[in-house]
Amino acid sequence: MIAKLLNWERIKPKGDPFMWIIIAILSLWGLLAVYSSTGALAYAKHGGSAELFLFQQLAYLLIGGYVMLYIHSIHYKMFMKVAKLVLYISYALLFLTLFVGSEINDAQRWLTIPFLGITFQTSEVAKVALILFIASELAKRQDDIKDFKKGFFPILIHVGITCMLIAPNNLSTALVLAATCFVIMFIGRVSIKHISFVLIPVLIVIVMLGFIVFKTPDKYLKPMGRFLTWKHRIENYSKPNNDADVTYQNDHAKIAIANGGFWGKGPGQSTERNFLPEAYSDFIYAIIIEEYGMFGGIAILFLYLFFMYRAFRIIVKSPKAFGALVAIGLSFALVMQAIINMAVAVNLFPVTGLTLPLISKGGTSIVITSLAFGMIMSVSRYVEEEQSLSEKK
């Protein structure tokens, strides 16, 4: 068993080399950015030693890297067999999170593993599980995919359950996941009429709910979970009230970006890392722009978009619907998360709490993200191998 796990011939990187290069660049850039941006946190917790966070990030990246390599060595068809089981496990984890989840930064999104003290965000597990399930069901139901009851509705139920379980504590993730699911279903040949039939009423309900929340006094929203947080975030974004305490995070993100100019101040030269809250996670993109300039910011965006482009190429090559849908679904979810994080950092979007994949400081989140990347690379690897075999014949 151990020999199989450590078999380099089995796990060595195969598949699209450009995608592997992008993953490596993002990981290394994230390591540098986390080391640079954790100075204030290190001083507050450990008396100024940022090296501890550097080694922590490196350890999780190494673990995540191995998970990615091992998962990519498994044929993507195996993921179809476990998709439904993993989805049901994610339901149990999400239910537990609602009632006994650990609260961090006023959000109850994490479960703590007993005796180990390790926390993980259950919505990240659910995101991967739901995308695998949808890809699996779409591949199985291609003959009935245009039938609302047989092809679309059974999938829609699980999308609704998962997103409703995630939304109370993590609305941004639930919305991004829902959007990803509809994109996968569109690519999987679900009727646009059926998607519109569901999507339009849902959007109307969201708008009406938002209107009600904004008209409701704060004192009545306090007992209602995170409704008050969502209201304040959107209010602070759309109508800044010039309260320095309220706009502190956005103000310092803007200062960091302005300081960066086009070429940046240089690696490790950020000054706003000492003032910007969550500089190592939610707002790490602002620190990257301060140190590497607009050039660095554009380069990061390009890397994610180029990864998405390479994932779309898999659709053209893939002989199986399941592989193509897994690759494009997971890639879309990761890249959409990255774009929203960057949009928040440059004040184009209200604060969401979404991190920058492979770059933001993390623990188990890096491992789960690496798992998703590993599944994408599994599709890339075996699609290329199958194509090569068919060409030889």
Image (cartoon, helix red, strand yellow):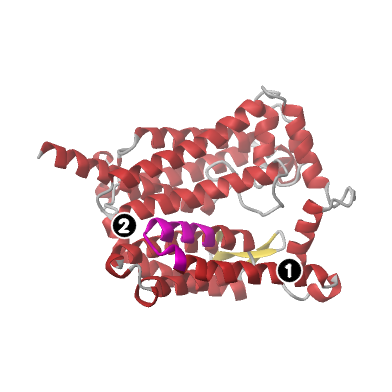
Name which quarter of the figure residue 380 lies in: top left
Residue visible at 65% across and 40% down in the picture: 284
- The magenta segment is 178-193
Q: Residue furthest front?
A: 193
Left or right position of 248 against 131? right
Residue 162 visible within the image: no
- Identity of the amino acid at label 1? Phe
Mark 2, other Cα within 10 Å: few <14 / some 14–19 / many ≥20: many
Q: What residue is disc 2 on?
A: 322
Name the image quarter holding the C terminus.
Answer: top left
Residue visible at 61% across and 69% down in the picture: 101
**Residue 393 vertical placement versus 352 (above, below):** above
Residue 231 visible within the image: yes
- Answer yes or no: do the residues labelled 2 and 1 have beta carbons within 8 Å? no
Q: How far from the left and from the top, in percent, is residue 323?
A: 31, 53
Q: CA distance from mark 2 to mark 1?
A: 37 Å
Q: Nearer the viewer, residue 102 or 95?
A: 95
| Labelled disc at residue 215 | none
**Residue 170 vertical placement versus 306 (above, below):** below
Q: Nearer the viewer, residue 237 or 52?
A: 237
Left or right position of 48 against 330? right
Left or right position of 262 against 254? left
Q: Secondary structure at mark 2?
A: helix
| Labelled disc at residue 227 | 1
**Residue 50 vertical placement versus 261 (above, below):** below
